[in-house]
């Protein structure tokens, strides 16, 4: 098992990008695929796409993002890739319902994005959980699910 205790940098850093370019040509770049919710964790045990068993232990101030470089040397690099996140797109029936829906999702601490009159809720678990919590508002016609998108 390989232990990583910090983030070296990001794939967009010019010095790192140059090293990655060289390693890419030799086919020795490994990726760790993480769900967005896992980026907040400070301790993880995962496997890279090449099968390397990896223990990640981060400092409190470190946060994994898409493109975080966990290891880079002359022989290989290990880079974080975030899995795609689905969004539940909700459309409130009107202004009062929009306020109520915004209050509701805020109280649940759901991650949201605003898209005009629509609210996009990040699905960071089972979709059924979100539908279940929203069921009373949906049943009363206060909002409707428009789509699931990425």
Image: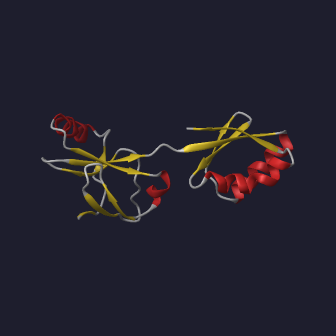
- Which quadrant: the N terminus? bottom left
Q: Is 24 in front, or is 47?
A: 47
The reply, left or right, for residue 126 in relation to residue 43 is right
Question: Residue 43 location, x and y as percent?
Answer: 38, 66
Q: Is 107 in front, or is 53?
A: 53
- The vertical placement of 74 against 39, above or below, is above
**Where on the picture, by quarter, is residue 59?**
bottom left
- The vertical placement of 71 against 41, above or below, is above
Q: What residue sits 29% from the left and 52% below the top?
A: 48
Q: What residue sits 50% from the left and 56% below the top?
A: 37
The reply, left or right, for residue 110 in relation to residue 32 is right
Question: Residue 126 location, x and y as percent?
Answer: 59, 55
Question: Residue 71 location, x and y as percent?
Answer: 24, 52
- Which quadrant: the C terminus? top right
What colouring style does the render use? secondary structure
**Where on the picture, by quarter, is residue 144?**
top right
Number of callouts in the render? 0
The reply, left or right, for residue 53 in relation to residue 138 is left
Q: Is 62 in front, or is 81?
A: 81
Q: What residue sits 83% from the left and 39% below the top?
A: 93
Q: What residue sits 68% from the left and 59% below the top?
A: 108
- The vertical placement of 23 against 108, above or below, is above
Question: Residue 41 location, x and y as percent?
Answer: 44, 62
């Amino acid at each position: 098992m390989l232990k990583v205790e910090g983030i070296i940098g990001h794939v967009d850093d010019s010095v790192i990008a140059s090293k990655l370019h060289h390693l890419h040509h030799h086919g020795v770049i490994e990726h760790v695929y993480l769900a967005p919710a896992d980026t907040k964790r400070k301790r993880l045990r995962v496997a890279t796409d090449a099968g390397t068993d990896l223990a990640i232990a981060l400092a409190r101030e470190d946060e994994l993002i898409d493109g975080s470089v966990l290891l880079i040397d002359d022989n290989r690099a290990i880079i974080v890739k975030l899995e795609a996140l689905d969004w539940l797109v909700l459309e409130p029936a009107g202004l009062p319902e929009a306020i109520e829906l915004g209050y509701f999702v805020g109280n649940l601490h759901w991650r949201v994005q605003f898209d005009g009159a629509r609210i996009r809720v990040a699905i960071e678990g089972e979709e059924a959980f979100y539908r279940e919590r929203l069921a009373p508002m949906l049943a009363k016609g206060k909002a409707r699910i428009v789509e699931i998108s990425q």
